[in-house]
């Protein structure tokens, strides 16, 4: 398996902690970590398999640190690349846009030709709406450290096992 690019903000504490668990589950030797706050579009080029950590901010927005990178990604050809997206949200505090960042990012890369892998079940969550929902699944791993922190470790481990097959 070629190295997997793992992109997330080193300064977004809960996302960084989740990313560390994802990296640990894969094995540090299989990943190359990139701080998205310092990333450029060219940083995505060497990887066929990419994991992105995207929390949802405010009322269903991507964090500000994506503001400069998103337009660059919108100009890229991402055909042949596989993206797995995880995000953090609060299903009780923000039930009308739970983990929207995952869905926003998935839509962005799919428009550019990428394949999104790592869909997970919506079972066990309680929210009103999520842009990340596709049928009865999320288009990535949705974590809620505010209300379901005790479930995150098992969810991450299960997701990583699924990604091992998807990334072959």
Image (cartoon, rainbow, N blue to C red):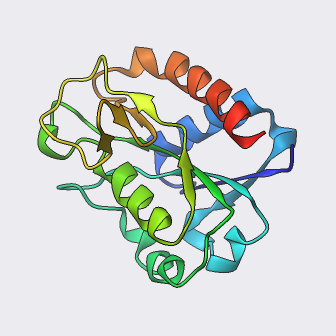
For this rendering, which residue is in front, 38 or 41? 41
Q: Is residue 154 above or below residue 17?
A: above
For this rendering, which residue is in front, 79 or 53? 79
Whether residue 93 is visible to the viewer of this picture, yes or no, is yes
For this rendering, which residue is in front, 57 or 86? 86
Whether residue 24 is visible to the viewer of this picture, yes or no, is no
Residue 29, percent from left and from top: 87, 41
Q: Is residue 165 left or right of residue 127?
A: right
The image quarter containing residue 150 is top left
Instruction: Look at the image and tell me in which quarter the N terminus lies.
Output: top right
Instruction: Look at the image and tell me in which quarter the C terminus lies.
Output: top right
Q: Residue at x 69, y 63 (%)?
A: 80
Q: Is residue 77 left or right of residue 99?
A: right
Q: Is residue 92 above or below residue 70?
A: above
Q: Residue at x 70, y 37 (%)?
A: 23
Q: Residue at x 76, y 61 (%)?
A: 47
Q: Is residue 90 left or right of residue 51?
A: left
Residue 151, percent from left and from top: 43, 16
Q: Residue at x 54, y 37 (%)?
A: 118
Residue 2, percent from left and from top: 86, 49
The image quarter containing residue 71 is bottom left
Residue 158, percent from left and from top: 58, 21
The image quarter containing residue 88 is top left
**Number of marks present in the image shown:** 0
For this rendering, which residue is in front, 111 or 96? 111
């Amino acid at each position: 398996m070629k190295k997997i690019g793992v992109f997330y903000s080193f300064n977004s504490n809960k996302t960084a902690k989740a990313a560390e668990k994802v990296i640990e589950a894969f094995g540090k030797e299989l990943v190359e970590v990139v701080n998205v706050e310092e990333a450029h579009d060219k940083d995505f080029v060497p990887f066929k398999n990419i994991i992105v950590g995207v929390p949802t901010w405010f009322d269903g927005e991507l964090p500000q640190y994506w503001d400069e990178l998103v337009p660059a990604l919108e100009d890229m050809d991402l055909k042949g690349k596989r993206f797995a997206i995880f995000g953090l949200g609060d299903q009780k505090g923000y039930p009308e846009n739970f983990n929207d960042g995952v869905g926003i990012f998935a839509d962005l890369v799919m428009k550019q030709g990428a394949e999104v892998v790592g869909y997970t079940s919506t079972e066990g969550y309680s929210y009103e709406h999520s842009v990340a929902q596709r049928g009865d699944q999320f288009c990535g791993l949705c974590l809620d450290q505010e209300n379901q922190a005790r479930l995150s470790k098992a969810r991450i481990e299960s997701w990583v096992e699924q990604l091992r097959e998807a990334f072959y």
